[in-house]
Image (spheres, rainbow, N blue to C red):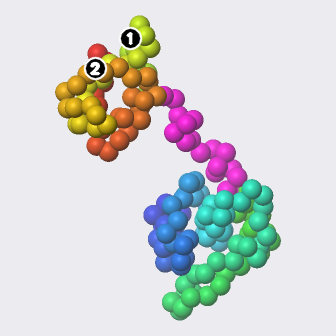
Amino acid sequence: MSKIDILAFLAATLTGSLKEHTLTIDITDAKEEIAPFVVAIDHGNFGEKPNVDVLEIDVFGADGKPSKLRPTASQRDQAWEFFLQAKKNKTTPKDAAAPEYKENKNGTVPVEFIHSINGYSKGEKAGFLPKEVTRLLNLKPPVIKVLNQ
């Protein structure tokens, strides 16, 4: 099942806060019968395997009417294992290798501001630590450009 198919399925069946939830994991490979419960686990931010009662969710049935859906113990176990594995395999920005910048002797990266921000004017040049350069480059739109790369 493709990611689009799963998202379409979830959008058609889930109601309430689960429908609005932004996933923190990739559920592309989740089986259709456990996908809603994986979303519920992700939404619930559980520290340990939840009870099946806690995972009861509101869905739209085939007739278009809202109804309750509760996983079986087996579905809950499968959803929990899928969630843990997906979380383990997830690459977060913290896990990703930081880009390499050419640093000055003092360990800073020379940058030029392309937009005014926080007291810095457009065209002003400064030096920042690589972590701060990455943060500033990730702003939308970026406010700096790296010099001497």
Percent x, y of residue 37: 66, 69
Give residue 56's quadrant in the image.
bottom right
Percent x, y of residue 5: 48, 67
Residue 3 seen in the figure = yes
Give residue 17's quadrant in the image.
bottom right
Q: Looking at the image, do the residues carrying marks 1 and 2 touch, with CB atoms under 8 Å apart?
A: no
> Does 89 appear in magenta?
yes
Percent x, y of residue 80: 73, 60
Magenta segment range?
82-98
Cα distance, mark 1 to mark 2? 11 Å
Residue type marked 1: Asn
Residue 13 seen in the figure = no
Percent x, y of residue 41: 67, 63
Give residue 118's quadrant in the image.
top left
Mark sitting on residue 147? 2
Label 1 sits on a secondary structure element that is loop
**Looking at the rendering, in which quadrant would you find the C terminus?**
top left
- As drawn, 135 above or below 125: below
- Residue at the far top in the pictured view: 105
Mark sitting on residue 104? 1
Assess disc 2: are there few (<14), some (14-19) or many (≥20) residues with their C-alpha within 10 Å of its C-alpha.
some
In the foreground, 54 or 108:
108
